[in-house]
């Protein structure tokens, strides 16, 4: 597998986990809807560190 493809997979996996935790925090009332929305925008632009 190419390095670019590996990096894309790491990015996607990281974004999925971050989105999951963001949703859980919101559902448990630990963050507000506004905080959840702001974090979702940041997560969508997040890239995993290169290995």
Image (cartoon, rainbow, N blue to C red):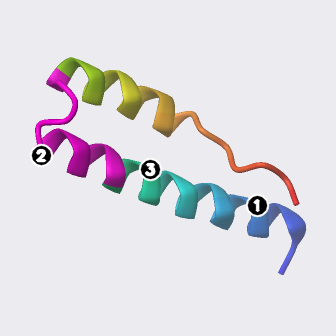
Asked if the magenta segment contains residue 51, the reply would be: no
> In terms of image quadrants, where is residue 46?
top right
Q: Where does the image place residue 13, in percent across and percent down from the top left?
A: 54, 64
**Label for residue 30?**
none
Q: Mark 3 points at which residue?
A: 18
Mark 3: give few (<14), some (14-19) or many (20+) Cα within 10 Å.
Answer: some
Query: Which image quarter is the N terminus in?
Result: bottom right
Query: Residue at 48% of width from left, 38% of height from top?
Result: 43
Q: Earlier in the sequence, mark 1 or mark 2?
A: 1
Instruction: Describe the element under mark 3 as helix, strand or loop.
Output: helix
Quadrant where the C terminus sits is bottom right
Determine whether label 3 and label 1 are within 8 Å by CB. Answer: no
Is residue 9 left or right of 18 when viewed as pictured? right
Q: How crowded is mark 2: few (under 14 residues within 10 Å), some or many (20 or more)?
A: few
Q: Which of marks 2 and 3 is nearer the N terminus?
A: 3
Count of labels in the image: 3
Magenta range is 21-33
> For residue 10, which quarter of the picture?
bottom right
Q: Residue 27 carries which label?
A: 2
Give the mark nearer the N terminus: 3 vs 1: 1
Q: Mark 1 points at which residue?
A: 7
Is label 1 in a helix, a strand or a loop? helix
Which numbered mark, 1 or 2, is in the foreground of this view? Answer: 2
User: Label 1: few (<14), some or many (≥20) within 10 Å?
Assistant: some
Q: In this view, does 8 lie above or below 43?
A: below
| Residue shown at 37% from the left, 49% from the top | 19
What secondary structure is the stretch in magenta mostly built from? helix
> Residue shown at 85%/53% (left/top)?
50
Residue 20, image x and y in percent?
33, 56
């Amino acid at each position: 597998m190419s390095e670019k493809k590996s990096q894309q997979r790491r990015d996607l996996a990281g974004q999925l986990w971050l989105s999951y935790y963001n949703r859980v925090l919101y559902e448990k009332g630990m963050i507000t809807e506004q905080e959840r929305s702001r974090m979702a925008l940041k997560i969508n632009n997040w890239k995993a560190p290169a290995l």
